[in-house]
Amino acid sequence: MTFRKYLVLAGVAVFAVTGDSLVSRGMKQVGGISLHDLAGIVLVVFRPEVALGVLFLLAFLGCYLAALSWADLTYVLPTTSVSFILLTLVAKFILHENVSLARWLGVLMISLGVGFVTQGPALTAQPRRRESHERVTAPISARTEP
Amino acid sequence: MKQQLYAWGAVACIVLASTTGDVLLSRTMKQVGDVGELRRRSGLAHVISRILSNPNFVIGIMAMATAFYAMLFGLSWGDVSLVIPAATSLTFVTNAVAAKFFLHERVDHRRWLAAVLVAGGVMLLAQ
């Protein structure tokens, strides 16, 4: 794992949190959506906050795909859950919210989970390549890297 | 009561759709190869076209979009503090199971423990 790769993982976490928060804020302003209002369901993504949130989620997707190209799904998901820890720290030290003991316990559990996973290798699966696609001829260093 | 049932239905849809999406996207990217090296060798346009032309990617994105809209519905029926943490934490566990069986990842005790700890932690954060 190189510094660049850790940066990509950090990008996954930060962009996901920002995108989700913006979409959530936008949806709160809309209120309840009815199943019968199909146009409303589609048009909701054009609201400014939801739209900006979607842009951040696209940036998240870029980093996420890059990470999945050199690491397992069961490595990427737990490691990028540091976003939940960041959110709690922001809530406590920047927004000065009251963070309950249960939430600190949650932060501790996630930290332990991230710690466990990052001690192991990033990539364990060696899937068969599809014949119809151009093969990657050169060996990929990340595949053997711990 | 009915709203609650709808909210849990939405949670089930989010978990199923996002697990399907995650597995398909992961499979796509393993088939494409390390994007950093591929970009240096053949350029960004080549990387993007390789990803976009992979059928798994298209189906994966459709699954992700389904999960996204299920989340929007879920949020309009249920409390944000129920829908998001329940769906997020369950997805960590279902993804570990799916990654083992469909992606053949070596999900050892360390990774199981991580999935369960993160899932539990996410639930606690919603308290």
Image (tube, coloured by chain):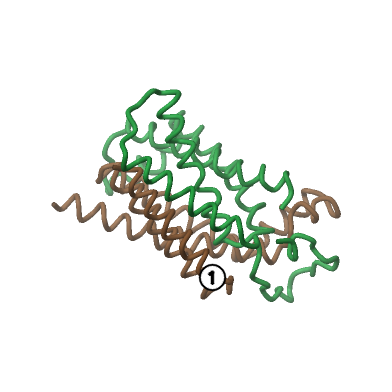
* Residue A9 x, y percent position in the rendering: 62, 46
Residue drawn 54% across the image and 60% down it: B60
Question: Taking B77 as reference, is B8 above or below it?
Answer: below
* Quadrant in which the C terminus of chain B is drawn: top left
Count the marks. 1
Question: Taking A61 as reference, is A125 above or below it?
Answer: below
Tell me the green chain.
A
Residue drawn 38% across the image and 32% down it: A25
Quadrant housing residue A14: top right
Front one among B23 and B64: B23
* Residue A50 x, y percent position in the rendering: 45, 34
Residue drawn 45% across the image and 39% down it: A20
Quadrant housing residue A28: top left
* Residue A22 x, y percent position in the rendering: 44, 33
Front one among A114 and A136: A114
The answer to whether A75 appears left or right of B34 in the picture is left
Colour of the chain lettered B:
brown
* Residue B82 x, y percent position in the rendering: 28, 47
Identified by mark 1, the residue type is: Asp
Residue drawn 67% across the image and 65% down it: B30
Give neighbour class at mark 1: few <14, some 14-19, many 20+ (Cα, 10 Å).
few
SS at circle 1: loop
Question: Taking A134 as reference, is B64 above or below it?
Answer: above
Q: Which residue is mark 1?
A: B108
Front one among A95 and A115: A115
